[in-house]
Amino acid sequence: MMFYFLIPYILILVLVIIHANKAGVTKADTGRELPFVSVWVAARNEQDNIFACLKSLENSNYPVEKFEVLVGDDASEDNTAALVKAFIVNKPNFKLINVDRLKGKARKKANVLAHLASHSRGELYLVCDADVVVAKTWINNMVASFDKETGTVSGSTAMEEGTLIGKMQSMDWLFFLTVLKATADIGIPGTGVGNNMAFTKEAYWQTGGYEAIDFSITEDFKLFDLIVKNGWKFKHRFDAETLNISAPQKNFKDLLKQRKRWLTGAKEVSWLWKIFLLFFGSFYPLLLISFFFNPQATLLVYIFKVMLQSVLLTVWRRKLFLNTKIADLIAYEFYLLIISPAVAFYYFLPTGKSWKGRNYSLI
């Protein structure tokens, strides 16, 4: 009987196939007046990444007089602030803001974003992380995604794929984004994507801003959830025009810490998304149990799952102009076999939750 509990996983993947390819790419409307945009970059101890991030924003094809870049330095203990100061010389649309106090209820990254919001002049707010390199077309196409009813838009993100662990994280992240897009296409809200996210000034301030929002370790979800509850529509894009490239977690331990933060934040998602996460998370344990009852059928289900997963990843990565080899797909399945139980085990360890040297467990 355990075999039948594997079927929902396949149904979710079928849902992704049907819906993730429905929505076309929103093209920039060159005939309308472009809004002024504020780009937020929260930075803490990012000396290895901040220059590439700022350089990519400088190279944007959005008119320079139509956007500002606000960098919030969250008490960095390295040369992040000095590097930003050197970069923004003679760049009037770039500004460094030193965050040295708390703003209302906001804490950690949310506190930095709350300070950046108070300095923003834009009609639209765009957010990227300091370890992200944005596409040249990012601002333009995120702006083009908005209409009068849309309050928030999330773009596409992949990881740097120069290492094996980087490529595996990239494939994992993109697979999650396809599920996120598939559910969004049928009207099921999931979450915003904190390293590639945009919202209107009006939608943001209707929530009261981060200083008025109860703290969450996943501040992007919290803001997204409140914007949607206020009646705004949401969109998720999956295309090269909004693709940002993020630095991956450098080692397995950091990867486990990241996933623990995500799972902690997932406690706040809707019951539908809890079901989705339960199906995905329970697949391998149920697979193992069902093997003892019906090994032949279980093997067929597993092979079908791997084949379907491989097709999906190949097709969607091609949409983003990312090449995929058969060896990558095989390695990704082995990666899932390792990371899935490891994350489940690490989640229950009393290790606390930290990010960029900041402890979230004390909040």
Image: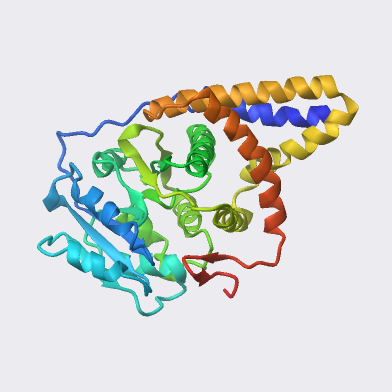
Height in image: 105 above or below 276?
Answer: below
Closest to the observer: 161 or 144?
Answer: 161
Q: Residue at x 26, y 57 (%)?
A: 51
Q: Residue at x 28, y 52 (%)?
A: 52
Q: Position of residue 3 (x, y in %)?
A: 82, 27
| Residue 16 appears in the rendering | no
Height in image: 68 above or below 8?
Answer: below
For residue 298, what is the image quadrant? top right
Closest to the observer: 362 or 256?
Answer: 256
Height in image: 47 above or below 231?
Answer: below
Q: Residue at x 67, y 21 (%)?
A: 304
Count of numbered marks: 0
Q: Position of residue 360 (x, y in %)?
A: 55, 69
| Residue 174 appears in the rendering | yes
**Image-based side of 271 in relation to 45, left or right:** right
Closest to the observer: 186 or 206?
Answer: 186
Q: Position of residue 194 (x, y in %)?
A: 43, 52
**Image-based side of 164 in relation to 270, left or right:** left
* Quadrant in which the C terminus appears: bottom right
**Image-based side of 220 in relation to 69, left or right:** right
Q: State the colouring used for the structure image.
A: rainbow
Closest to the observer: 202 or 276?
Answer: 276
For residue 268, what is the image quadrant? bottom right
Which residue appears farthest toward the left when viewing the image?
90
For residue 179, what is the image quadrant? top right
Q: Position of residue 294 (x, y in %)?
A: 87, 24
* Quadrant in which the N terminus appears: top right
